[in-house]
Each structure stands twice: as C-alpha cells, then as structure tokens.
C-alpha cells in the first residue's frame, strides 16, 4: 500500500475528537487507500477493496456515508475489530471516509477541448487497484467560495494517435474557474485517481508504463512546454 502526504483541495481531511484532560483520544490507528464498492449485503451498503486485493468490511460506522453507484477511490480511517467476517480480511470500525477525485482517462481530439492549462505539479504517482494514482499540488483561491476546479488525465489526440515507445503519453490538466484576479493563489495538494480499463491497459498498448506530462506550477508566461514523470508497475 502506498502512503501519501496530502491536504485535500478546499477541505482538510479531519476527524473531530472530543477529549477531556483525563481521557485518552479515541482515534483510528490505520488509514487505507481503497476503492469503495456498493454492496447491498453490507449493513453500511459498501465495502473497501485495497490495491493488494484485501477487503475491508464496515463492521461499525462513526461517520455517515452514502456509497456511490459507481466505484470511487477514498481514504478509509479505521481501527480493526477483533471479530472476523467471512470473506473479508479486515472487520473495521470506520472513523472517517474521504473520497478522492476519481475519473476515467479523457480523450481530447480538438484544440478547443484542451482547456485545462493551469499549472500543476506531480509529487508522486503509482499504478494500483486498476488506477493511475497521482498525488499533485496546484494553486487555488481560498477566498472565493464560488470557485470550481477541474483535474483530468487526458489522452491528447488532437493530431491523431501520438507516436510512442516504451511509455504511453498522457497529460495531467488542471483549471480553476473563475481565474485568479489577484496573485497566483494558495498552494494545496491532493490525490486524483484515473481508471485505466482495457483501452489503456499496458498490455493492450504494448508499453511498460505511462509518460505523465504536466505544465509545471512556475512556468513563465507563454511557456507551453511540459514536465514529465514516468510511472510503471512496481
């Protein structure tokens, strides 16, 4: 399981704990990056699937959570319950669930569709759980309550299918709306997970990994060059 240091965009991951001077803090002792699947057989309506294939059963919940119809990536904060549940590797007392940006890889075929051109920086990336998982940092406006941001992993096919060798090129794009009117914003970091599927499986592409391209945070105005990070299965 990979570990990331992160501060979620526009909202911190936080688990409130009340304590007195005489009582210890009651808090989770494990955090897992997992894919959450809806499951009617579970009292909570879902289970968590770790990237190594282990399954987390929500034996008890300390937070309200409504699972999505489609799988979503999330950080699950929990303590393990001693009593096992058949078919699961962990029976968990769940304290918090923080959903992560979870998208498909987007095909871009026209220059007009290439609109996510704000700076972004890849901190770390790895392949796991059927996703390309990217820890990144970007600038947002913390004082604009109406601001929206968009993060996409794009297959740029504006000029047709690109030529590639051992690594297939994909572009990480980011955009804030509305744009900043004063300064460059506040730097924050987060995780985005992009579903690989059959179309972008390395076996079908005949590649050993992906070449992740991105426009760095501190590019000079008019500089449209890309920084690059290579990622392949470990």
Image (tube, grey):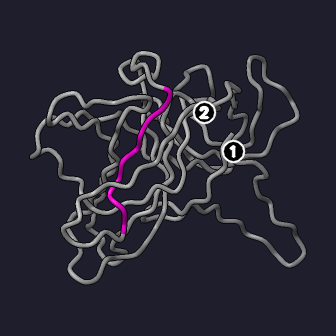
Give the side of residue 196 with respect to residue 80, left or right.
left
Task: Tell me how far mark 1 sits from mark 2, CA to CA.
Answer: 10 Å
Q: Is residue 221 above or below residue 214?
A: below
Which mark is on residue 210? none
Tags 1 and 2 touching, CB below 8 Å: yes
Question: Going 53% across and 46% down the picture, which residue do you hit?
Answer: 125
* Circle 1 Cα neighbour tier, 10 Å, few/some/many (<14 / 14–19 / ≥20): many
Question: Going 20% across and 37% down the picture, which residue do you hit?
Answer: 108
Q: Is residue 73 above or below residue 191?
A: above
Q: What main secondary structure does the magenta stretch of the protein show?
A: strand
Give the side of residue 184 with respect to residue 101, left or right.
left
Which residue occupies the foreground of this view, 161 or 132?
161
Residue 80 position within the rendered picture, expressed as x and y whole percent measured from the top left: 81, 40
Q: Secondary structure at mark 1?
A: strand
* Circle 2 Cα neighbour tier, 10 Å, few/some/many (<14 / 14–19 / ≥20): some
In the displayed orientation, state which residue is furthest to the bottom. 182
Snapshot quadrant of residue 176: bottom left
Per the image, the residue denoted by label 2 is: 44
Query: How many numbered marks have been drawn onto this rendered protein structure?
Result: 2
Which is nearer the N-term, disc 1 or disc 2?
2
Residue 2 position within the rendered picture, expressed as x and y whole percent measured from the top left: 66, 44
Q: Secondary structure at mark 2?
A: loop
- Whether the magenta-drawn stretch holds residue 55 is answered as no
- Whether the magenta-drawn stretch holds residue 212 is answered as yes
Question: Going 74% across and 23% down the picture, which residue do you hit?
Answer: 88
Between circles 1 and 2, the one closer to the viewer is 1
The quadrant of the image that shows the C terminus is top right
Give the side of residue 54 with respect to residue 193, left or right.
right
Which residue occupies the foreground of this view, 121 or 80?
121
- Please state the extent of the stretch shown in magenta in the rendering: 208-217
Residue 38 position within the rendered picture, expressed as x and y whole percent measured from the top left: 52, 27
Per the image, the residue denoted by label 1 is: 94
């Amino acid at each position: 399981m990979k570990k990331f240091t992160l501060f979620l965009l526009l909202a911190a991951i936080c688990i409130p704990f009340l304590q007195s001077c005489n009582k210890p803090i009651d808090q989770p002792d494990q955090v897992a990056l997992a894919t959450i699947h809806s499951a009617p057989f579970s009292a909570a309506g879902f289970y968590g699937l770790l990237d190594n294939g282990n399954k987390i059963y929500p034996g008890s919940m300390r937070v309200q959570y409504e699972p999505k119809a489609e799988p979503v990536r999330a950080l699950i904060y929990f303590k393990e319950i001693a009593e096992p549940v058949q078919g699961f590797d962990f029976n968990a007392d769940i304290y918090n669930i923080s959903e992560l940006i979870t998208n498909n890889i987007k095909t871009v075929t026209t220059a007009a569709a290439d609109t996510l051109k704000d700076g972004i920086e890849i901190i770390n990336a790895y392949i796991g759980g059927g996703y390309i998982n990217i820890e990144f940092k970007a600038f947002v406006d913390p004082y604009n309550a109406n601001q929206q941001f968009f993060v996409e992993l794009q297959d740029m096919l504006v000029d047709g299918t690109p030529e590639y060798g051992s690594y297939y090129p994909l572009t990480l794009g980011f955009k804030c709306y509305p744009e900043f009117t004063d300064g460059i914003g506040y730097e924050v970091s987060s995780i985005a997970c992009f579903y690989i599927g059959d179309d972008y499986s390395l076996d079908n592409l005949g590649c050993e990994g992906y070449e992740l391209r991105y426009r760095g945070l501190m590019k000079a105005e008019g500089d449209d060059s890309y920084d690059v990070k290579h990622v392949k299965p470990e």
